């Protein structure tokens, strides 16, 4: 199983731990080895055969050629420096967070490794972006459950018109029989008890 640590480390840890506990409690589940990776690396690991199944996100990850099973969908929040004027707001819009002259959006690499144009800093890891937000150099928009990793120097503000983010499992169709028990257990787990952060 692959999990992107970038931007979502603590929330992902809780998600992975919940899944591992459910898999361990079901005799039909095959053994699971966890392989951590950075943002955008899951698809390559699946295509190379180094991983059989991955936790990914729609609409940000490239899901072309993979079978998928949705786990849950949630809104997004802006992670801002605590001292910034926008941190006092109860909600923001994408237009507002996309045009903050003193606090440009962080720029994440595209799937080909290049960066989109813009004034914000180029980032690759959660650690980089967390430090830059705390220093008042950038902001980012992430799934609401990811606020679990924010530092005391950060504030999370809901972005009311951000596209919903769906956390899902993805796998090559050729491996469907092998991972079917994992998909069945995971989707049943989240159908019964979706994460509370997903509702905010």
Image: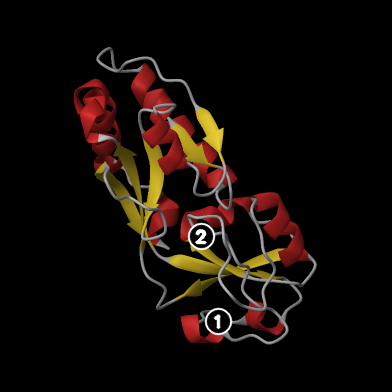
Which is nearer the eye, 173 or 22? 173
What residue do we see at 28% from left, 12% from top?
27
Q: Residue at x 61, y 73 (%)?
A: 105
Q: Secondary structure at mark 1?
A: helix
Which mark is on residue 98?
1
Q: Is residue 32 visible?
A: yes
Label 2 secondary element? loop
Query: Which residue is at the far right?
Result: 135
Residue 126: which numbered mark, if any?
none
Q: Residue at x 44, y 26 (%)?
A: 50
Toward which corner of the image does residue 36 lie, by quadrant? top right
Q: Quadrant of the N terminus?
A: top left
Q: Is residue 158 above or below residue 10?
A: below
Horizontal side of residue 188 vs 51, given as left or right? left
Choose mark 2 or mark 1, whichever is in front: 2
Q: Is residue 153 visible?
A: no
Mark linked to residue 110: 2
Question: Is 135 left, or right, of 172 in this rendering?
Answer: right
Marked residue nearer the N-terminal end (2 or 1): 1
């Amino acid at each position: 199983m692959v999990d992107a640590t970038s931007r979502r480390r603590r929330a992902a840890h809780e998600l992975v731990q919940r899944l591992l506990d459910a898999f361990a409690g079901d005799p039909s589940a095959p053994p699971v080895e966890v392989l951590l990776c950075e943002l955008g690396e899951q698809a390559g690991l699946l295509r190379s055969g180094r991983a059989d199944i991955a936790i990914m996100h729609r609409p940000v990850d490239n899901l072309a050629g993979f079978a998928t099973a949705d786990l849950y969908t949630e809104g997004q929040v802006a992670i801002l420096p605590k001292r910034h004027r926008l941190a006092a707001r109860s909600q923001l819009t994408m237009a507002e967070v996309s045009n903050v002259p003193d606090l440009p959006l962080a720029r994440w690499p595209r799937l080909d490794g290049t960066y989109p144009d813009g004034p914000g800093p180029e980032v690759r890891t959660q650690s980089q972006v967390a430090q830059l937000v705390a220093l008042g150099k950038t902001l980012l928009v992430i799934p609401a459950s990811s606020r679990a990793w924010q530092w005391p120097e950060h504030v999370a503000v809901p972005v009311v018109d951000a596209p919903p983010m769906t956390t899902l499992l993805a796998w090559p169709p050729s491996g469907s029989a092998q991972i079917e028990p994992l998909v069945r257990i995971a989707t049943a787990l989240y159908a019964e008890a979706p994460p509370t952060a997903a509702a905010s």
